[in-house]
Amino acid sequence: MQMPVHIVAAGGFVENVKDEILLVKTRRDGQWVFPGGQVEVGENLIEGVIREVKEESGIDVKVSHLIGVFSNTATYEGHSGVKIVPTKVMFDFVCEPVGGELTTSDETSESRWVSKGEVLNMVSAPALRTRYQAYLDYNGSVHYMDYITKPQFELKFKRNI
């Protein structure tokens, strides 16, 4: 048996006191997303989401609680010399802003606060919309979902833990 390989990522639903959510626009494809990304070697999940939010938006955060664990179990052709992108496991956290200023980065062309009701008008990727709905539906139980994103989005499994 080949040893499994997984990409581990952490995402942040950053809520401000005006009940708005932080979104960033990616330079890669111009899509609006929640800040987050791959956890680096030697970094834990909390450190990873704090770093990613700061890097992508300029906002410093404090992590409040975990709301979801998501597995993208499809493998697909990579880019930049990577032949196959392995299964990705993502941990989504609710975060509170504690400082910083909205800015952009090498990865983002825009960052802004958006009312909770407007988020789905801006976020178009089905997997991100599904994860945002899990955030909205959070009732104290962590959501777990298994999906694939290519060739098209398909939710394969869903439950609360």
Image (cartoon, helix red, strand yellow):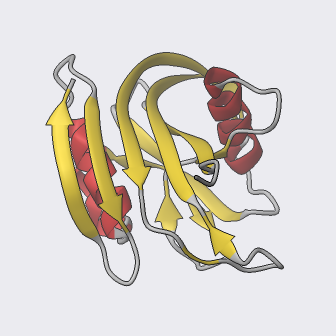
Question: Residue sitting at 59 percent across and 49 percent down?
Answer: 4
Q: Is residue 23 visible?
A: no
From the viewer's side, name the closer residue of 17 and 8: 8
Q: On the rendered structure, is 79 left or right of 21?
A: right
**Is residue 12 shown left or right of residue 81?**
left
Measuring from the top left, give residue 52's x and y in whole percent: 69, 41
> In the image, what residue occupies the spot 18% across and 45% down?
158
Residue 146 coordinates in the image, percent (x, y): 30, 51
For the residue pair 77 and 60, the one nearer the viewer reads as: 77
Q: What is the quadrant of residue 143 in the picture?
A: top left
Question: Which of the 4 quarters of the picture holds residue 128?
Answer: bottom left
Q: Position of residue 148 (x, y in %)?
A: 36, 66
Residue 141 is left or right of residue 30, and the answer is left
Q: How many marks?
A: 0
Can residue 120 be seen here? yes
Name above or below for residue 8 compared with residue 64.
Answer: below
Q: Residue at x 77, y 27 (%)?
A: 43
Residue 103 at what x, y percent from top left? 73, 50
134 w.r.t. 79: above or below: above
Q: Quadrant of the C terminus?
A: top left
The one nearer the camera, 60 or 125, is: 125
